Amino acid sequence: MSSDQSAQQLADDPDWIPHWYDPDGDSAPITHGEGARVIDDQGESYLDFIASLYCVNAGHDNQAIIDAVKTQLDRIPYVSSGKENDTRTKLARRLAEVSPEPLTDVVFSVSGSEANELAVQYAREYRDASKVLTRWQSYHGSTYGTAALTADPSTRNNVNSHAAVTGSGKFLPPLPSVFDAEGEELAEQAANHVEYVIRNEGPDSVAAILMEPVAGSSGAYPAPEGYFERLREICDEYGVLLIADEVIAGFGRCGEMFAMQDEGVDPDMISFAKGVTSAYVPLAGVLMRKEIADDIREDGTDVGQTFAGHPLGCAAGLAAIDEYEDHLIENGREMGALLEEGLHDLADSYDEISHVHGKGLLWGIVVENPETGEPFANSWVDDDVDNPVSEVLGEAKDRGVLVGLGRPDYQITLSPPLCIDEDDVEEALDALDESFAAVFE
């Protein structure tokens, strides 16, 4: 039996259940990847403008990362997460070098969800407080702990349907539609609202604020200028830790190694995953200030994960960071500027696109009914309504371009690999233009 026949057999009669499984969904097995493209078992090639899951930042065939993993395999493929390993140590030091200056130490994990759980655990212990505040409409993971932090109801309600998890509070996101303001006024109002929440929760009960610098799957919107500066002041005033969830925003995705480096503000911790290895090997972790790390070292820790800081992942991470610094981040900035210009032109062409927003190579397109100013459909409210945004995604796929459906699902998300070129940007924009025309004209 050929490999193509085997792949087709698995597609026709699968013996596993995919994540985010939709029994009515239409998908084909992906079997190969080249640069910014993926190829299915029928030989169809697609421009991967979502980097598979906001994670394949270096593209699907970066030889430097592949060679680093092979070299590590030849040396030793696994070392217990409770023991020292030279590759693990090198990556920890490298991460400290490329992160905001006050962040000196790292604890590794396996996934972004687990990284966020670790960050929260350390924040609660350091502050001797239980509550962590996150914004409505956020996504931080789908484990029991991170589902409580997540404010996407489709995730939170599903995970908590039989055992609710406590210890989190919510605040409103800094969006113009929420505060009826823009720019500096929006930044001030939204940050002052966070202070109001802290004061009413009781500052001594709040361990941390956990927030993405640029929203990921929930819409790719950046915070207004000055927001994080004010948020840092508030956290310092009340002794609350500021944790940046950079699982999606990190490693060049938003134009810098970490998105917080473009905000002029240093967080107390950064959670990371996905792009750290370009998703070639699962790896995640938490970067933190020295005083937090010293607190952990003083008492030790009795918890861990078998595959945290896996040597293969650490080898991939070292190579990926070199690739980002060498050329990929700069290329991502250039392509991001082209993409931004093209998306604004696209928005000018269709009344159904109410606005586009983003940073670097992370962008969101909001689709609304121009007659009502409201979304055509929102599965968080009513999942029985036909959603034309899903049709746009299907049309784009038919044209060979994969884009994402945001949370809520009246948004389209774009998150291509940093290795794309001008032709890729033009191809994606043309496919979106034709797809919007096919659905709305």
Image: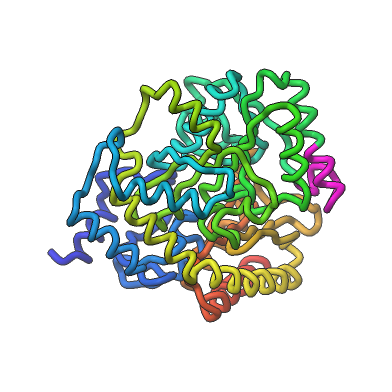
Q: Residue at x 29, y 55 (%)?
A: 11
Residue 416 visible at all: yes
* Left or right, residue 115 beside residue 312: right
Q: How is the image coloured?
A: rainbow
Boundaries of the magenta span = 175-191
Q: Residue at x 43, y 66 (%)?
A: 323
* Left or right, residue 400 beside residue 207: left
Instruction: Give residue 407's position: percent from left, percent from top.
Output: 60, 47
Residue placed farthest to the left in the image? Answer: 1
Instruction: Give residue 262's position: percent from left, percent from top.
Output: 66, 56
Q: Nearer the viewer, residue 309 or 13?
A: 309
Q: Residue at x 78, y 59 (%)?
A: 370
Q: Nearer the viewer, residue 276 or 335?
A: 276
Quadrant position of the N terminus in the picture? bottom left
Residue 382 visible at all: no
Residue 6, by quadrant, is: bottom left
Instruction: Give residue 154's position: percent from left, percent from top.
Output: 56, 37
Quadrant position of the C terminus in the picture? bottom right
151 shown above or below 415: above
Please tell me whether residue 56 belongs to the stretch shown in magenta: no
Q: Residue at x 72, y 33 (%)?
A: 236
Q: Main secondary structure of the magenta part?
A: helix
* Left or right, residue 35 beside residue 357: left
